[in-house]
Amino acid sequence: MASTPTQRAEYYFGRAKSNFISTMAGDEASIPQEMRSGLQDMADGMANLSVGLRATYALLSEVQKTLQQVQQTLQQNRLARP
Protein backbone atom coordinates (compact mmCIF):
# COMPACT_ATOMS: atom_id res chain seq x y z
CA MET A 1 0.00 0.00 0.00
CA ALA A 2 1.36 3.39 -0.97
CA SER A 3 1.42 6.06 1.68
CA THR A 4 1.06 9.80 1.33
CA PRO A 5 3.81 12.23 2.34
CA THR A 6 1.87 13.24 5.46
CA GLN A 7 1.37 9.61 6.47
CA ARG A 8 5.11 9.02 6.10
CA ALA A 9 5.83 12.18 8.08
CA GLU A 10 3.52 11.04 10.85
CA TYR A 11 5.28 7.66 10.92
CA TYR A 12 8.76 9.21 11.09
CA PHE A 13 7.77 11.75 13.75
CA GLY A 14 6.37 8.91 15.86
CA ARG A 15 9.49 6.85 15.32
CA ALA A 16 11.72 9.79 16.27
CA LYS A 17 9.74 10.27 19.46
CA SER A 18 10.01 6.57 20.32
CA ASN A 19 13.75 6.58 19.68
CA PHE A 20 14.17 9.69 21.79
CA ILE A 21 12.14 8.23 24.66
CA SER A 22 14.13 4.98 24.62
CA THR A 23 17.43 6.90 24.51
CA MET A 24 16.25 9.16 27.31
CA ALA A 25 15.38 6.17 29.48
CA GLY A 26 18.86 4.74 29.03
CA ASP A 27 20.84 7.85 29.96
CA GLU A 28 18.38 10.31 31.44
CA ALA A 29 20.90 12.04 33.70
CA SER A 30 23.04 13.30 30.82
CA ILE A 31 20.15 15.11 29.07
CA PRO A 32 18.82 18.26 30.76
CA GLN A 33 15.10 18.15 31.60
CA GLU A 34 14.40 21.26 29.52
CA MET A 35 15.95 19.64 26.46
CA ARG A 36 14.03 16.39 26.98
CA SER A 37 10.75 18.27 27.36
CA GLY A 38 11.48 20.50 24.38
CA LEU A 39 12.34 17.62 22.06
CA GLN A 40 9.32 15.61 23.13
CA ASP A 41 7.06 18.65 22.58
CA MET A 42 8.58 19.18 19.13
CA ALA A 43 7.96 15.54 18.19
CA ASP A 44 4.34 15.81 19.40
CA GLY A 45 3.85 19.07 17.53
CA MET A 46 5.24 17.67 14.30
CA ALA A 47 3.05 14.58 14.57
CA ASN A 48 -0.01 16.80 15.06
CA LEU A 49 1.07 18.97 12.15
CA SER A 50 1.21 15.96 9.84
CA VAL A 51 -2.31 14.93 10.91
CA GLY A 52 -3.53 18.48 10.30
CA LEU A 53 -1.95 18.56 6.85
CA ARG A 54 -3.64 15.30 5.94
CA ALA A 55 -7.00 16.75 7.01
CA THR A 56 -6.31 19.88 4.97
CA TYR A 57 -5.56 17.81 1.87
CA ALA A 58 -8.83 15.93 2.33
CA LEU A 59 -10.78 19.19 2.56
CA LEU A 60 -9.00 20.63 -0.47
CA SER A 61 -9.93 17.51 -2.42
CA GLU A 62 -13.59 18.08 -1.57
CA VAL A 63 -13.36 21.74 -2.59
CA GLN A 64 -11.77 20.71 -5.89
CA LYS A 65 -14.57 18.22 -6.61
CA THR A 66 -17.22 20.84 -5.84
CA LEU A 67 -15.48 23.41 -8.03
CA GLN A 68 -15.35 20.95 -10.93
CA GLN A 69 -19.07 20.23 -10.53
CA VAL A 70 -19.85 23.96 -10.55
CA GLN A 71 -17.73 24.45 -13.68
CA GLN A 72 -19.51 21.58 -15.43
CA THR A 73 -22.90 23.02 -14.51
CA LEU A 74 -21.91 26.45 -15.81
CA GLN A 75 -20.69 24.96 -19.08
CA GLN A 76 -23.89 22.96 -19.51
CA ASN A 77 -25.99 26.09 -18.85
CA ARG A 78 -24.00 28.08 -21.42
CA LEU A 79 -24.48 25.35 -24.03
CA ALA A 80 -28.20 25.13 -23.30
CA ARG A 81 -28.80 28.86 -23.95
CA PRO A 82 -30.04 29.85 -27.41
Image (cartoon, rainbow, N blue to C red):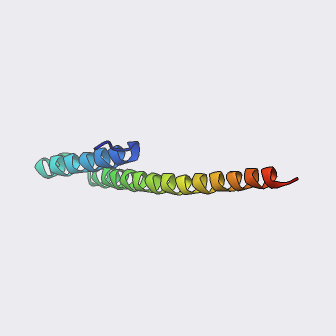
From the viewer's perspective, is residue 5 above or below residue 46?
A: above
* Residue 19 can be seen, yes or no: yes
Coordinates of residue 33 in the picture (x, y in percent): 27, 54
Left or right of 21: which side holds 72? right
Q: Residue at x 33, y 51 (%)?
A: 43
Coordinates of residue 26 in the picture (x, y in percent): 11, 48
Coordinates of residue 10 in the picture (x, y in percent): 34, 49
Task: Looking at the picture, tell me which residue is in the foreground, 61 or 45.
Answer: 61
* Residue 31 can be seen, yes or no: no
Left or right of 7: which side holds 60? right
Residue furthest to the left: 26
From the viewer's perspective, is residue 12 above or below residue 67?
A: above
Q: How many marks?
A: 0
Task: Looking at the picture, tell me which residue is in the foreground, 31 or 53.
Answer: 53
Left or right of 16: which side holds 7? right
Q: Residue at x 21, y 50 (%)?
A: 18
Q: Quadrant of residue 16?
A: top left
Q: Residue at x 27, y 50 (%)?
A: 14
Coordinates of residue 50 in the picture (x, y in percent): 41, 51
Task: Looking at the picture, tell me which residue is in the foreground, 79 or 74.
Answer: 79
Q: Residue at x 28, y 44 (%)?
A: 1
Residue furthest to the right: 82
